[in-house]
Image (spheres, rainbow, N blue to C red):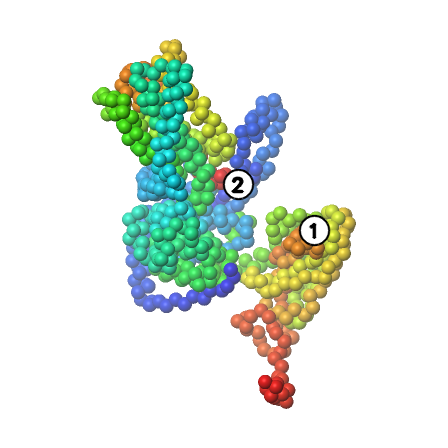
Amino acid sequence: MTEPVSLEVELSQTSKQEDLRDQFQHIENLTETIIQPPQSLLTLNLGDVWRYRDLFSLLVWRDIATRYRQSIVGVGWAVIKPVLSMLIFTFIFGTVAGIKSDGSPYALFSFTALLPWMYFSNSLSAATNSIVGSGNMLQKVYFPRLILPLVGVVTGLMELLIQLVVLIGLMAWYQFVPGWQIVLAPLFIVMATLTALAVGLWLTALNVKYRDIGQAVPFLTQAWMWLSPIVYTSAAVPEKYRLIYGLNPMVGVIEGFRWSFLGTTTPDWRMMGVSFSVVIVLLITGLLFFRKTEDTFADII
Amino acid sequence: MPTALKIENISKRYQLGLTHSRSIRELVNGLGSRLIGRKQQATTQGEFWALKDVSFKVNQGEVIGIIGKNGAGKSTLLKILSQITKPTSGKAVLKGRVASLLEVGTGFHPELTGRENVYLNGTILGMTKKEVARRFDEIIAFSGIEKFIDTPVKRYSSGMTVRLGFAVAAHLDPEILIVDEVLAVGDVEFQKRCLSKMQDVANSGRTVLFVSHNLASIRNLTSRCVVLRKGQLVFDGDTSPAITQYIQINRTEFVSTGDVRTLERAFKGLSQSVRFTKLVMLEEAQTLKPDEDIRFQMTLRAEENVGCFLIGLSIFRDDDFPVGGTFSVELPALQQGDSIDYTFKLPQPPLAPGKYYCGISVVEANTSDKNMFDSLTGVLPFEVTQAGFGQRFWNPGWGVIRFNPLLQIPETESQDKVNVN
């Protein structure tokens, strides 16, 4: 468009000057933004994330609100997927293969593992795709990039909440009364969130540069599922491999979650300790790695 | 006057070849060849300085324009000031809240309603939910789409989406506003509103950085401009001389020897089956009297056998306003390797005095979609002088075309016509 646009601006000179004087006094107290080359000193800048908390909550809300638009079953999908998997698992592993659960009905046994697992794998793939998937936004506006993977792992909590209601219904059906350890369940949900975030931070940052990550994640989660105690108990893993097995952080999450609901067998605490340490290490290094690479996201995406 | 924005020796280097993402295979190959001692294939073809040592200051309340050709570094500078990317070296200090508008409607979700998107877009641009809520009514009124505010954005026309996006941005209320070429979208009426809104922002003592190719709006809105060329600041001063400088640069980039083999093409993806190798104006001074023919000579080289073709010529005023265009007659087919000279004239173009330049292309003659072989723009600059123009001094406000003189129809003839009716 090269149409010349003429402007007519009328101003009362005095009021403008007054305005300006106000502005000048105002500017002395303004915050300064300093733009510099990336510093080698690592700072996490979490304060910035807090300042943008409204954006965070709106993005979470957007993802939840748009997930089921133009869908007939809608939120029902959150229930159908784990229930169907549970039925198939119960038939194949519980009935056909005869894998032992820990004393609880196999349906309950697999369902309590499927919930944290499905939440984890969905959140992981959401977090991994969060940066590349918002490429356009990254190149047009500044906000703390950490918000995107955070949104990815938090959005799934809504589905998990609905599924927990189904779980409670299922327990009532089996007339299964949970013990005191049920109060620890939120802790293990938080652990699942942190695990998805920790791994997601690494993968999403790597995915910006190496798109192969996006291809590999579905396969990775598939393999990871069989390496987690979902269709079997971790007690079935030979004693000498337990600690190595525990290096899989989802082992701690799933065993803990199942124990808090069903309380049948107390988990191997040393193995749980290994799992949780791995999450903490992955999370801290993930945050640092993400912070170090985020300055280049807009350039190479 | 207090300084709102200070830029000191900002440079930005891009590593060519690393700007796009690499695959793991490439990485493994690279590592492998390094291990066996072979020299790694040059993945870094070199580096490219998008900005080099740019420094300037902007006072509070100033509206400053940033002009330069494509690739001059304007967008990179805006991205650095908007904190989207980091500089390679240098420093910038901004005082106060910065809002940058490099695009309207960033983050709009098609499934969400206009209302929901206003909140989303507002927070993406750095507002809090409360701030959006406070200004919500104003935003909707400004956008002029009250009726559709609860309709999903995917049902909006593109114009409505832009209106809504700009309405949100217009109510950001920052101390420093950074605006990229976002006004190129939308109709004239809306552009006018956007510009006057920006003028309002400026008049309230806020600082505005404005990038545009539209020299008319730059002239209207800014009092000072910086001119960038190949990443460097070449001019910093009043808008009028800045625009003159900008036009000057565009002209000198066209090599006077007429060798256009390596000149940047007007479009990407041209086949160049036939390409321009030389292009010169026969009037060496590049000034024409009114009604003088435009004469130029060019050499075309055929890289493969091609059928009949045409030469297309369009003329632009120096502020990029398109004046008009024409085609040559059909020219005979060429064999691969031919290098042929042509001389053309455009007889007596009725151009008003002023400065112009041309765009020129080779177009396939026989296809309906006018397949373009090669195309250059910003070439053959010339000036039409006032001298020799007998009637009056030409006022630019009269336009770009001088029509033939008005002729009086003899009294008897017009009488006849009336009688017939």
Q: Which mark is residue B14?
A: 2
Picture quadrant where residue A152 is located:
top left
Q: Which mark is residue B380?
A: none
Of helix, strand and loop, which one carries label 2?
Answer: strand
Rounded to the nearest angstrom, the CA distance separating label 1 from label 2 is: 30 Å
Q: What chain does badge 1 belong to? A: B
Marks 1 and 2 belong to one chain: yes
In the rendered image, the vertical position of residue A211 relative to residue A236, given as above or below: below
At label 2, counting other C-alpha atoms closer than 10 Å, the crowd grade (few under 14, some 14-19, many 20 or more) is some
In the rendered image, the vertical position of residue A287 relative to residue B107, given as above or below: above
At label 1, counting other C-alpha atoms closer than 10 Å, the crowd grade (few under 14, some 14-19, many 20 or more) is many
- Give amino acid for label 1: Arg
**Residue drawn at (43%, 23%) of the image:** A224
- Give amino acid for label 2: Tyr
Residue B26 percent coordinates (x, y): 57, 30
> Can you identify the residue that label 1 sits on?
B275
Comparing A287 with B249, the one in front is: A287
Q: Left or right: where does residue A224 sit relative to residue B386?
A: left
**Residue drawn at (30%, 62%) of the image:** A18
Comparing A155 with A56, the one in front is: A155
